Image: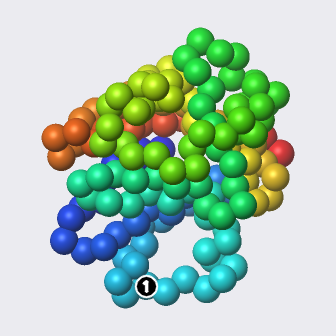
Amino acid sequence: MKLAPPPCGVYLSLRIDFDSDRLVQRIDTDSQTLNSAEEKAFDVIYEGCFTGHMTTASGRVGGVLRKGSPATLEACRSAANGGGLESISWDSGRALADLGIEPGAALCFITDQNRVALAKINSMTKVNGSIPAVDFTVTSWH
């Protein structure tokens, strides 16, 4: 899975549903309206072409599994329940470093279907000057 800043000019957000076969959906929030069930299915929302802001969806939890930690169901569930990813700006390298968001670390979430999702960071490349495009490998457990 690749997460990159949405293009500027139209208001797009990227919605991630770790329970879906189609993990990332681009939503044009100026013209596209989602019904309640569609909105509730998303686990993570990423938006902002210059700021790169990520939030966990309402009722979801997410946290960081630090580089070198075992990538197990139990470790990921514990990291997710520990929180920390409720609202982060991807344009602040220091804030990302303070959270332990770097290649080799993983972002962990508990989905609306009570699955545990691990998104291991393979690489981070700067886009638009300071916002990283991030390449992930995703694993989920039931």
Which residue is found at the position 78% from the left and 48% from the top?
Answer: 115
Residue in front for this viewpoint, 24 or 84:
84
Residue 17 visible to an observer of this rendering: no
- Looking at the rendered structure, the kind of residue marked 1 is Gln
Which residue is found at the position 70% from the left and 16% from the top?
Answer: 70
Q: Which residue is mark 1?
A: 32
- Left or right, 41 with respect to 26, comes to right
- Left or right, 49 with respect to 71, comes to left
Q: Give the image location of residue 7, x and y in percent.
A: 24, 61
Circle 1 packing at 10 Å, graded few (<14), some (14-19), many (20+), is: few
Which residue is found at the position 69% from the left and 48% from the top?
Answer: 61
Q: Give the image location of residue 8, x and y in percent.
A: 21, 65
Model colouring: rainbow
Q: Give the image location of residue 79, x and y in percent.
A: 70, 32
Q: Give the image location of residue 99, x and y in percent.
A: 50, 29
Residue 85 visible to an observer of this rendering: yes
Residue at the extreme top of the image, as rendered: 68
Under circle 1, the secondary element is: loop
- Left or right, 53 with respect to 84, comes to left
Establish if 102 lies above or below 28. Answer: above
